[in-house]
């Protein structure tokens, strides 16, 4: 029997049982990972996960069940229905789903080279070459090179008449070099993961970058620690993406604001009525969007055609010239603030419920060139690549450490590097200190393939586009 027939039968059964609404997600996920450390293969794996998850709503209550046996969904539908029916006795407030229209559509990630057709030998040869290059540049350092690829075949259908098929590809890789002395350890890394094909690997030019980062990891061992105090910072996309993720992406998720995530991943300093209060989140230079639309040269991991609730991809302005404008929402929580879903109900695999998840959270370009941004800094630093981070449960107080700081003096990069640069601050104060953002030709899309949220934990794939940006008087510790 074809999958569509199986899905149709499951939805028919749900309606027969008495469901007010039901939807089903069938996901077929293939993963491939390769890793080389100091010339030795440490990971060479290929995995497949296939199954279906079914949501059923009855009298304002929801039941969910999943199975890896998509050829026999009868029991799974019954379990989901019985769970919803039982839950009606415990409801303090009925669930209301924001309206949507039935959609029949297809979507596929645009790719040039299917990564699963590229032979393992070719991939491994590139990784071992990178390892060899790094060993030659710094024979005492630990080096690592990796690639990972993901393909998802997704079907969404519901009792409203939707039937959506989507195919997603994810490709990426990177290199890292860790230099170690008797008293210190310093790391330099490089890489990226995008929604695209094997062309991502080709464009990364890993062998060339492998030599550079290996030299820099050794140089950092002898570099001085970054000075403490308040300094002007030019933050590059390789660090700024994580600042966006932690201090804008997570606190604007409505389920956090409403308290759904407090037990595990924390809440948010934002309140539901902050939209109407014209809350100042940052300076006039800060405009940040949540963009799932497939309209960038580089396709972020948060790009899709439709979310896991059948809502079309959208571009939503979260912060407009420093003023907070919108939350990230899904169908079950958007009505609580009187809105429709922004299409951010996403799940990691067939066995999980959709949650509010980031799409591509992007800092919009300004007008500066990188040279102009640096030229207006008398004394400061240019920061690259995240090393570590921490942020409180309400996403207010944070601390970020980077791999390397490059000195800026009298409007010029001096060539001097510092190790262990760490800056700290509070979210709105930090974004309020931004007084310049580079133009669009300097922006870069950075993938985050390991964003954790929910109970049970779901590891999702999101991304952030950012140009370099300048921040004044940031506390370095």
Image: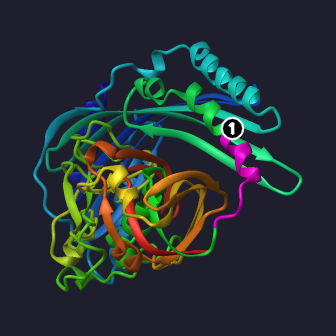
Q: Is residue 25 above or below residue 32?
A: below
* Left or right: where 102 falls relative to 49: left
Q: Residue 336: x and y, percent?
A: 22, 77
**Dominant secondary structure of the magenta stretch?**
helix
- Residue at the spot of label 1: 215
- Magenta segment: 215-226
Q: Residue 63: x and y, percent?
A: 36, 62
Give whichever of 447, 358 is nearer the camera. Answer: 447
Residue placed at 44% from the left, 45% from the top? 349
Residue 221 inside the magenta-drawn segment = yes
Residue placed at 14% from the left, 45% from the top? 161
Residue placed at 54% from the left, 53% from the top? 414
* Residue 404 makes an appearance in the image: yes
Q: Is residue 232 above or below residue 353?
A: below
Q: Quadrant of the C terminus?
A: bottom right
Secondary structure at badge 1 equals: helix
Residue placed at 23% from the left, 85% from the top? 273
Give whichever of 387, 216 is nearer the camera. Answer: 216
* Left or right: where 452 falls relative to 2: right
Residue 255 inside the magenta-drawn segment = no
């Amino acid at each position: 029997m074809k999958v569509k027939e199986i899905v149709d039968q499951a939805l028919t059964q749900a309606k027969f049982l008495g469901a007010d609404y039901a939807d089903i997600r069938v996901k077929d996920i293939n993963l491939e990972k390769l890793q080389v450390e100091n010339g030795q293969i440490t990971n060479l794996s290929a995995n497949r996960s296939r199954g279906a998850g079914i949501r059923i709503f009855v009298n304002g209550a929801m039941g969910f069940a999943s199975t890896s046996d998509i050829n026999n969904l009868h029991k799974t539908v019954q379990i989901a229905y019985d769970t919803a029916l039982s839950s009606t006795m415990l409801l303090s407030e009925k669930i209301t789903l924001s309206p949507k229209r039935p959609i029949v559509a297809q979507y596929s990630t645009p790719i040039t080279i299917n990564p699963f057709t590229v032979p393992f030998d070719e991939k491994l040869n590139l990784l071992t070459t990178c390892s060899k290059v790094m060993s030659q540049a710094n024979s005492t350092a630990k080096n690592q090179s990796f690639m990972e690829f993901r393909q998802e075949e997704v079907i969404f259908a519901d009792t409203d008449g939707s039937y959506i098929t989507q195919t997603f590809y994810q490709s990426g890789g990177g290199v890292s070099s860790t230099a170690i002395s008797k008293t210190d350890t310093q790391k330099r890394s490089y890489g990226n993961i995008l929604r695209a094909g094997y062309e991502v690997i080709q464009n990364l030019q890993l062998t060339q970058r492998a030599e550079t980062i290996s030299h820099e990891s050794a140089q950092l061992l002898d570099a001085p620690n970054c000075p403490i105090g308040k300094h002007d910072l030019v933050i590059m996309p390789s660090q700024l993406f994580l600042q966006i993720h932690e201090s804008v992406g997570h606190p604007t998720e409505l389920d956090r604001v409403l308290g759904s995530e407090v037990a595990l991943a924390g809440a948010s300093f934002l309140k539901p009525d902050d939209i109407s209060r014209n809350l100042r989140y940052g300076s006039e230079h800060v405009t940040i969007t949540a963009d799932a639309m497939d309209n960038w040269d580089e396709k972020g991991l948060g790009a899709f055609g439709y979310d896991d609730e059948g809502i079309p991809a959208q571009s939503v302005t979260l912060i407009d010239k420093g003023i907070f404008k919108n939350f990230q929402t899904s169908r079950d929580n958007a009505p609580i603030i009187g809105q429709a879903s922004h299409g951010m109900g996403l799940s990691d695999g067939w066995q999980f419920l959709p949650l509010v998840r980031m799409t591509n959270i992007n800092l919009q370009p300004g007008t500066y060139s990188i040279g102009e941004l640096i030229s207006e800094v008398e004394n400061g630093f240019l920061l690259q690549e995240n090393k570590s981070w921490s942020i409180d449960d309400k996403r207010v107080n944070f601390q970020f450490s980077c791999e390397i700081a490059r000195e800026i003096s009298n409007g010029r990069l001096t060539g001097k590097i510092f190790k262990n640069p760490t800056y700290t601050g509070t979210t709105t104060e930090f974004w309020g200190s931004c007084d310049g953002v580079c133009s669009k030709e300097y922006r870069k899309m950075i993938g985050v393939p390991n964003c954790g949220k929910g109970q049970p934990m779901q590891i999702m794939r999101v991304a952030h586009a950012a140009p370099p940006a300048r921040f004044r008087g940031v506390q370095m510790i």
